[in-house]
Image: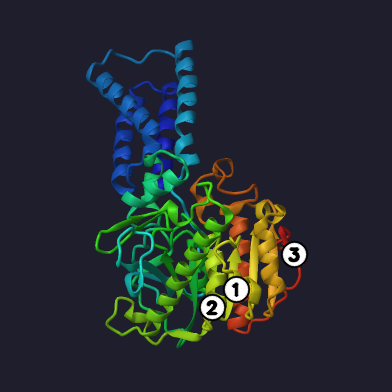
């Protein structure tokens, strides 16, 4: 709960207790004052539907108290059984009313631990060399929205960027993907990150390593904010696209909207394995093409471009790619086919989008895979495909899984609610520990190969993260 939400709750609690000490209408005046606190909370922190029960109690008590103050009946009555009954009922009602804002809080991502502040910028790219496959419009070029996080100079007093832009579109889209009512995630519009929009790039280093992030099917570019901000705070630039028509929704700078197109990855339609794999590998090639186009664009930045502050600040000899789920497969596809990739990290990588030729040739650069316990323990076809890739690879390889985790533990989704394990958004392991593990291994991997940082974290278990299990 946010500060004024807690204050409102405490004021209502005091109001319920006051009748035990009330001899001069203190409780009535306190109810009126509580209405002011409620108004301040709505004006400063914003209305959200989870607070409606508390608003209702405050409003009801306020109206009743105003009536009592304008219709005085002399001295207050002595304590009675009725007073105790009202006290018990009030506590019960307040206890129930406080549950929605506690169970569905405004999400918060971990504060980055690195020495740099974090900046972010967003740009729209149009790839005229590739046709959009999933819009149903012949000849339409591939349009992308890309967000970039980077080490930044500290900007005093600047308001952090929102966790998710265009919540009028994104909120209902994500809620629908989770089979929740459209209004359910409206409060996420209040979530803030630790990045400052368009902050100046830090002068701490002349150039920074560049990482690309590819989200999962039905995901979105900001789904791993905890991870990309941590990387930026440690001296990396991270660029992430919304893979148009594969993302849950893409909102373009010109106001256009592209929603997820289920036919792009038709895994629930009963198609033959051959037809499905063709569709999946077509998608993987398209997403790998997105990553390649982003690199081409960033390599040719001019000072006057929308992301011009990064001109000549990116080190194209240190390029890594990471991805979650379908994006993990796309990252592997890209790194196997684009020589600019020097290291690849997959988080529960979904392997069907990876082409047969890539599986046969393997990877010749360092590669790391982190699996959730659910995926690692399920000896599925996906595991077999990844094992095939590893057996054909010549680059350094690392494989782990994290105990008590599920597929969405790699994303920001567990921050949505303490109910996340029961909604299928995470495993039982504490979400803060999960993000610490993922960030530690991500930094160790890219730090070793791009910054020459030494350490044993990649090679052997550590007491700090006993949940991380090394796979042969």
Which labelled disc corresponds to residue 358?
1
Residue located beneath label 2 in the image? 337
Proximity of marks 1 and 2: CB atoms separated by less than 8 Å: yes
Up the image or down, 389 lies above or below 171; here it is below
Q: Earlier in the sequence, mark 3 or mark 2?
A: 2
In front here: 35 or 269?
Answer: 269
In front here: 81 or 363?
Answer: 363
Q: Earlier in the sequence, mark 1 or mark 2?
A: 2
* Res. 162 image quadrant: bottom left
Mark 1: which secondary structure?
Answer: helix
Taking the spot 71% from the left edge, 57% from the top edge, the residue there is 467
Left or right of 40, for residue 369 = right
Q: Earlier in the sequence, mark 1 or mark 3?
A: 1
Which labelled disc corresponds to residue 320?
none
Instruction: Please identify, in this view, whether the residue under mark 3 or under mark 2 is nearer the observer.
Output: 2
Q: Position of residue 3 (x, y in %)?
A: 41, 47
- Check the image and name the residue furthest to the left: 70
Mark 3 and mark 2: Cα distance apart in space: 26 Å
Proximity of marks 1 and 3: CB atoms separated by less than 8 Å: no
Q: Position of residue 398 (x, y in %)?
A: 69, 71
Mark 1 and mark 2: Cα distance apart in space: 8 Å
Residue located beneath label 3 in the image? 471
Taking the spot 45% from the left edge, 46% from the top edge, the residue there is 177
Q: Position of residue 131 (x, y in %)?
A: 35, 69
* Res. 38 image quadrant: top left
Does any portion of residue 116 appear in the rendered image?
yes
Left or right of 394, for residue 214 = left
Taking the spot 34% from the left edge, 57% from the top edge, the residue there is 258
Instruction: Please identify, in this view, whether the residue under mark 1 or under mark 3 is nearer the observer.
Output: 1
The crowding category of the residue bearing disc 1, from other C-alpha atoms within 10 Å (few below 14, some 14 to 19, many at least 20), is: some
Left or right of 103, for residue 61 = left
């Amino acid at each position: 709960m946010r500060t004024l939400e807690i204050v409102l709750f405490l004021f209502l609690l005091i109001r319920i207790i006051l009748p035990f000490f009330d001899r001069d209408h203190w409780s009535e005046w306190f109810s009126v004052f509580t209405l002011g606190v409620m108004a301040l909370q709505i004006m400063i922190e914003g209305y959200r539907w989870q607070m409606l029960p508390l608003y209702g109690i405050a409003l009801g008590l306020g109206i009743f108290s105003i009536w009592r103050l304008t219709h005085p009946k002399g001295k207050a009555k002595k304590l009675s059984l009725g007073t105790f009954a009202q006290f018990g009922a009030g506590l019960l009602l307040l206890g129930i009313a406080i549950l929605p804002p506690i169970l569905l809080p405004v999400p918060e991502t971990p504060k980055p631990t690195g020495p740099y502040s974090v900046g972010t910028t967003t740009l729209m790219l149009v790839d005229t060399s590739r046709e959009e496959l999933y819009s149903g419009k012949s000849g339409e070029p591939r349009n992308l929205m890309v967000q970039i996080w980077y080490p930044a100079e500290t900007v005093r007093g600047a308001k952090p960027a929102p966790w998710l832009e265009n919540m009028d579109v994104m909120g209902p889209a994500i809620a629908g993907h989770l089979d929740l009512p459209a209004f359910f995630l409206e409060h996420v519009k209040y979530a803030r990150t630790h990045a400052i929009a368009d902050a100046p790039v830090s002068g701490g280093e002349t150039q920074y390593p560049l990482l690309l992030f590819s989200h999962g099917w039905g995901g979105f570019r900001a789904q791993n904010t905890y991870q990309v901000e941590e990387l930026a705070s440690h001296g990396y630039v991270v660029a992430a696209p919304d893979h148009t028509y594969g993302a849950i929704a893409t909102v373009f700078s010109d106001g256009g909207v592209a929603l997820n197109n289920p036919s792009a990855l038709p895994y629930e339609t009963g198609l033959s394995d051959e037809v499905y794999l063709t569709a999946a590998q077509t998608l993987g090639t398209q997403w790998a093409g997105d990553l390649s186009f982003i690199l081409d664009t960033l390599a040719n930045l001019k000072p006057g471009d929308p992301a011009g502050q990064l001109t000549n600040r990116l080190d194209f000899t240190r390029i890594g790619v990471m991805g979650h789920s379908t994006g993990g497969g796309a990252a592997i596809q890209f790194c196997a086919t684009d020589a600019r990739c020097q290291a690849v990290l997959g988080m529960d990588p979904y392997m069907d989008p990876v082409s047969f030729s890539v599986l046969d040739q393997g990877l010749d650069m360092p590669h790391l895979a982190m699996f959730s316990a659910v995926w690692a323990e399920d000896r599925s076809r996906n595991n077999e495909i990844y094992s095939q890739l590893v057996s054909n690879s010549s680059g350094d390889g690392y494989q782990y899984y994290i105990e008590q985790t599920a597929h969405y533990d790699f994303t920001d989704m567990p921050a949505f609610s303490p109910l996340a394990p029961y909604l299928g958004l995470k495993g039982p392991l504490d979400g803060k520990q999960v993000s610490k593990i993922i960030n530690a291994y991500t930094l160790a991997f890219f730090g070793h190969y791009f910054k020459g940082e030494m350490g044993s974290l990649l090679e052997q278990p550590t007491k700090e993260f006993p949940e991380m299990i090394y796979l042969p």
